[in-house]
Image (cartoon, grey):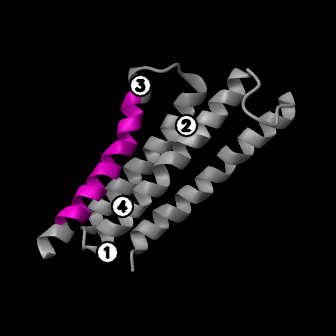
Amino acid sequence: MPEISFFFGALLALVQVPMTLAVGLRRRAVGVSFLDGGDDALLRKIRGHANFTETVPITIIAMVAAEMFGAADAVLWAGGGLLVFGRLAHYWAMMKIEAGAVRFALMLCTLIPMAGFSILALFEYLSRA
C-alpha cells in the first residue's frame, strides 16, 4: 500500500480547502459569480487555486506509482515535502508577486517531484518488462 503517497495526497487535499474557500469568499465580496470580473485579487486566487489543481493530482499519481514500484521512503518523503513546500510557497507568491524568477523557482519545487516520481516509476516499470 502506498502509505507515504496517500499521506501527502490527504495533506494536500486539506491544503486545497482554504484555497477553494478563498475564491468563493472573494467572489462573494466583489459580486462576481463567473470569470474574474476584472478583479486582480480574484484572478490571482483563481489562478493560484487552478495551478494547484492542475499540478498536485498528477504528481500524487506519479508518486503512488513510484511508491508501488519500490521507491525509497527517503525519496518519497523528500519529494513529497518539496511538493508541499512548493505548492504553499507558489500559492503565496501568486498572491503577492508578479511573474518572475521567484515564482519560476517555486514552480520547480513542483516540477521536480512531478518529473522525478514519473521517471522513477517508468524506469522501474521498464526494468521489469
Instruction: Using a 10 Å C-alpha cutoff, classify the residue at mark 1 as few (fewer than 14 neighbours), some (14 to 19) or many (20 or more).
Output: some
Instruction: Using a 10 Å C-alpha cutoff, classify the residue at mark 2 as few (fewer than 14 neighbours), some (14 to 19) or many (20 or more).
Output: many
Please indicate whether residue 34 sits to the left or right of residue 92 in the image: right
Disc 3 residue type (three-letter): Val
What residue is shown at x 29% (from left), y 66% (from top)?
A: 66
Is label 1 or label 2 in front?
1
User: Of the residues under marks 3 and 2, which one precedes in the sequence?
Assistant: 2
User: Of the residues under marks 3 and 1, which one precedes in the sequence?
Assistant: 1
Q: Residue furthest bottom?
A: 1
Query: How far apart are the two marked residues, 4 and 1, measured between alpha carbons?
Result: 10 Å
Q: Which residue is mark 4?
A: 62
Query: How far apart are the two marked residues, 1 and 2, measured between alpha carbons?
Result: 29 Å
Where residue 50 sits in the image (x, y, percent)? 58, 42
State yes or no: discs 4 and 3 in contact (Cβ < 8 Å): no
Is label 4 or label 3 in front?
4
Please indicate whether residue 35 sits to the left or right of residue 104 in the image: right
Residue 102 numbered mark, or none: 3
Instruction: Using a 10 Å C-alpha cutoff, classify the residue at mark 3 as few (fewer than 14 neighbours), some (14 to 19) or many (20 or more).
Output: some
Is label 2 or label 4 in front?
4
Query: How far apart are the two marked residues, 3 and 2, measured between alpha carbons?
Result: 12 Å
Where residue 65 sits in the image (x, y, percent)? 33, 68
Query: How far apart are the two marked residues, 4 and 3, measured between alpha carbons?
Result: 25 Å
Give the quarter of the figure containing the C terminus.
bottom left
Whether residue 46 is situated above or below residue 52 in the rendered picture: above
Disc 4 residue type (three-letter): Ala
Q: Secondary structure at mark 4?
A: helix
Q: Secondary structure at mark 2?
A: helix
What residue is shown at x 48% (from left), y 67% (from top)?
A: 7
Q: Which residue is mark 1?
A: 68
Task: Report the magenta stretch's main SS.
Answer: helix
State yes or no: discs 3 and 1 in contact (Cβ < 8 Å): no
User: Of the residues under marks 1 and 2, which one precedes in the sequence?
Assistant: 1
